[in-house]
C-alpha cells in the first residue's frame, strides 16, 4: 500500500466502514445477479440443468417467433403511454388546487398520498377486482342511472382501462413533488403578470409550466420507469395468466410466466435485459426531447 493510499484510508476509513454494509448489499444483491442474468440471457437454462450457451438465439426468437412477447410489448406500451400522462395531469391539477393555501393542507396532502402507498398492494388489487366485477360497485352505480354494466374484467376491450384507472389513482407521489415545485415559483412573477393584464390561464402557461418544467421531466421519467414495471395489479386481476385474450399480458407478467411457470430462465433473463434496454432508450429520448421545453434558471 503506497503512502498516499495509506493516508487516504487513514482519513476516510470511518465513512467507508459505515458504507460497507450498503456496498456489500449492492455487490451481492445487485451487481452479481445482473452479471449472472446477462450471462444466462445467452443460454438455455431451466433451473435444474447446467446452462447451455446458445448465443443470441433467445433474442432472435423473442422478436421473430414469440407472438406473446410482441403482444406483451403492445399491451405494455399502450398502458404506459395512456396512464402516465393522465396520472401526471391529474396530479398537477390537484397540486395546483392544494397550492392555494387551504386550511389543513398537511392533512389533505397526507390523505391524497395514501393511494400511492396502497395502490401497488395485493389487497388493493383484490379490492379493485371487487369494484369492477360483474356485480361490483361500478356496475351498481351505473344501474341506478338505468345503464347496463359490462364485465369490466372479463371483456378484453375494457380490462386494460381498469388497470389504467388504478394507475392514475396512484397520483400521490407525483402530486407531492409537483406541490413542492409550485411552492418555489416566486409570487412576484404572478403579481407582475397580473399588473400587465395577464389572465390566470396565461400565467399558468407562461410562468408556472416553464418554471416547474424540470419537475415535470423528473415525474415523467420516474413514472414511465415505474409503469413499465407494473406487475402486482395485472397478476391479480389477470389471474396470473394475462387475462381474457391476453389483454392484461403486461411485459413483467409475461417475464414472470416464462421464468417461473415454464422455467425458461435463460429466455426470461433475455426479456429482462430487453426491458432494461427499452427503458434506457425511452429515458434517453425523454432527456433529448427535454432540451426543447425544459427551462433551467441560470
Image (spheres, rainbow, N blue to C red):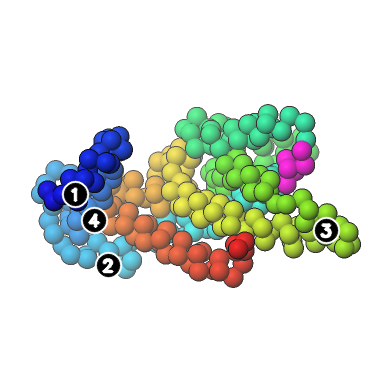
Mark 3 surroundings within 10 Å by alpha-carbon count, few (fewer than 14), some (14 through 19), many (20 or more): few
Q: How many marks?
A: 4
Query: In the rendered image, is residue 240 in sight?
Result: yes
In this picture, is 198 found above or below 100? below
Q: Identify the disc placed on residue 192.
A: 3
The answer to whether the residues at label 3 and label 4 have Cβ atoms under 8 Å apart is no
Mark 2 surroundings within 10 Å by alpha-carbon count, few (fewer than 14), some (14 through 19), many (20 or more): few
Residue lying at 19% horizontally and 56% vertically, measured from the top left: 39
For the residues labelled 1 and 2, the Cα–Cα distance comes to 48 Å
In the picture of the structure, the residue carrying the numbered disc 4 is 38
In the picture of the structure, the residue carrying the numbered disc 2 is 60
Q: Quadrant of the C terminus?
A: bottom right
Q: Report the span colored magenta.
A: 96-101
Q: Position of residue 83 (x, y in %)?
A: 57, 52
Q: Identify the disc placed on residue 296.
A: none
User: In the image, 143: left or right of 10?
Assistant: right
Chain-order first, disc 4 or disc 2: 4
Chain-order first, disc 3 or disc 4: 4
Residue lying at 74% horizontally and 63% vertically, measured from the top left: 206
Q: Position of residue 242 (x, y in %)?
A: 43, 47
In the picture of the structure, the residue carrying the numbered disc 1 is 5
For the residues labelled 3 and 1, the Cα–Cα distance comes to 57 Å
For the residues labelled 1 and 4, the Cα–Cα distance comes to 34 Å
The answer to whether the residues at label 2 and label 3 have Cβ atoms under 8 Å apart is no
Amino acid at each position: 500500500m503506497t503512502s498516499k493510499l495509506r493516508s487516504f484510508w487513514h482519513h476516510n476509513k470511518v465513512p467507508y466502514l459505515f458504507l460497507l454494509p450498503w456496498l456489500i448489499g449492492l455487490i451481492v444483491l445487485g451487481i452479481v445477479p445482473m452479471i449472472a442474468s446477462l450471462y444466462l440471457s445467452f443460454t438455455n437454462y431451466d433451473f435444474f440443468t447446467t446452462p447451455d450457451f446458445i448465443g443470441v438465439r433467445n433474442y432472435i426468437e423473442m422478436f421473430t417467433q414469440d407472438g406473446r412477447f410482441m403482444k406483451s410489448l403492445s399491451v405494455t406500451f399502450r398502458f404506459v403511454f395512456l396512464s402516465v400522462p393522465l396520472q401526471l395531469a391529474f396530479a398537477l391539477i390537484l397540486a395546483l388546487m392544494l397550492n392555494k393555501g387551504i386550511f389543513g393542507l398537511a392533512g389533505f396532502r397526507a390523505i391524497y398520498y395514501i393511494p400511492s402507498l396502497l395502490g401497488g398492494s395485493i389487497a388493493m388489487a383484490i379490492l379493485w377486482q371487487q369494484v369492477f366485477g360483474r356485480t361490483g360497485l361500478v356496475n351498481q352505480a351505473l344501474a341506478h342511472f338505468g345503464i347496463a354494466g359490462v364485465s369490466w374484467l372479463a371483456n378484453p376491450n375494457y380490462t386494460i382501462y381498469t388497470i389504467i384507472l388504478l394507475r392514475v389513482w396512484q397520483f400521490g407521489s407525483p402530486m407531492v413533488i409537483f406541490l413542492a415545485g409550485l411552492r418555489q415559483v416566486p409570487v412576484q412573477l404572478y403579481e407582475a403578470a397580473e399588473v400587465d393584464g395577464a389572465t390566470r390561464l396565461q400565467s399558468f402557461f407562461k410562468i408556472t409550466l416553464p418554471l416547474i418544467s424540470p419537475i415535470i421531466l423528473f415525474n415523467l421519467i420516474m413514472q414511465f420507469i415505474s409503469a413499465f414495471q407494473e406487475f402486482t395489479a395485472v397478476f391479480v386481476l389477470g389471474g396470473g395468466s394475462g387475462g381474457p385474450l391476453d389483454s392484461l399480458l403486461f411485459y413483467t407478467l409475461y417475464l414472470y410466466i416464462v421464468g417461473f411457470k415454464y422455467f425458461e430462465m435463460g429466455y426470461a433473463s433475455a426479456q429482462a435485459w430487453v426491458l432494461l434496454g427499452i427503458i434506457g432508450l425511452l429515458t434517453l429520448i425523454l432527456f433529448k426531447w427535454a432540451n426543447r421545453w425544459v427551462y433551467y434558471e441560470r
